[in-house]
Image: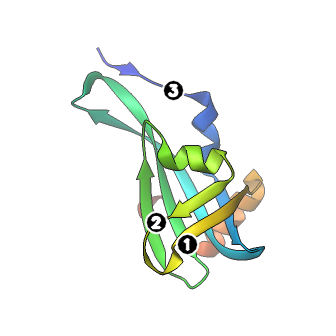
Amino acid sequence: MFTREHDPSLDVFDGGCLVLRRDGEVAGHVATMLGTFWSPGRPLTVQQQVWLVVVWADGERERVEDYPPWSVVASIRAGEYVEDDGPHRGRYTVTWLPEVESEAMRAELGVTPADF
């Protein structure tokens, strides 16, 4: 029988939305979703993972996934998002939107469950 891991501290990532800022200016948003996955390294455990859709201010989108040991999640918890490549390379401060604002912003950005 499978064991399902659940870390309540990750619940904020289920349907969340963050604002990315650089030098005080809004640079984009990150929509988040909590999911699960199976790994051959832990065949009897279903683990949690976090999906992110980054929507940059210029309209570019990218999908990111994170799972234990949580490099992106740890960065967000520390108050920043780091983009390593491309035209948006750099460090951004992050601010979580309240639940109602998250839902509205995800709708405004056109982010749906199919994007994850």
> Horizontally, is 99 left or right of 62 in the view?
right
Q: What is the three-letter code of the residue carrying label 2?
A: Asp
Within 10 angstroms of label 1, few (less than 14), some, or many (20 or more) residues? Answer: many
Residue at 55 percent of width and 61 percent of height = 82
- Residue 14 makes an appearance in the image: no
- Badge 2 vs badge 3, beta-carbon distance below 8 Å: no
Pick the residue in front: 72 or 97: 72
The colour style of the image is: rainbow
Secondary structure under the numbered disc 3 in the rendered image: loop
Question: Which label sits on residue 55?
Answer: 1
Q: What is the three-letter code of the residue carrying label 1?
A: Val
Q: What is the three-letter code of the residue carrying label 3?
A: His
Question: Which label sits on residue 84?
Answer: 2
x, y percentage for residue 40?
21, 30
Residue at 74 percent of width and 57 percent of height = 97
Within 10 angstroms of label 2, few (less than 14), some, or many (20 or more) residues? Answer: few
Marks 2 and 1: which is nearer the front?
A: 2
Quadrant where the image shows the N terminus: top left
Earlier-in-chain disc, 2 versus 3: 3
Q: Is 43 rendered above or below residue 111?
A: above
Residue annotated with mark 3 = 6
Task: Measure the alpha-carbon separation of dots 2 and 1.
Answer: 16 Å
Which image quadrant is residue 9 in?
Answer: top right
Secondary structure under the numbered disc 2 in the rendered image: loop
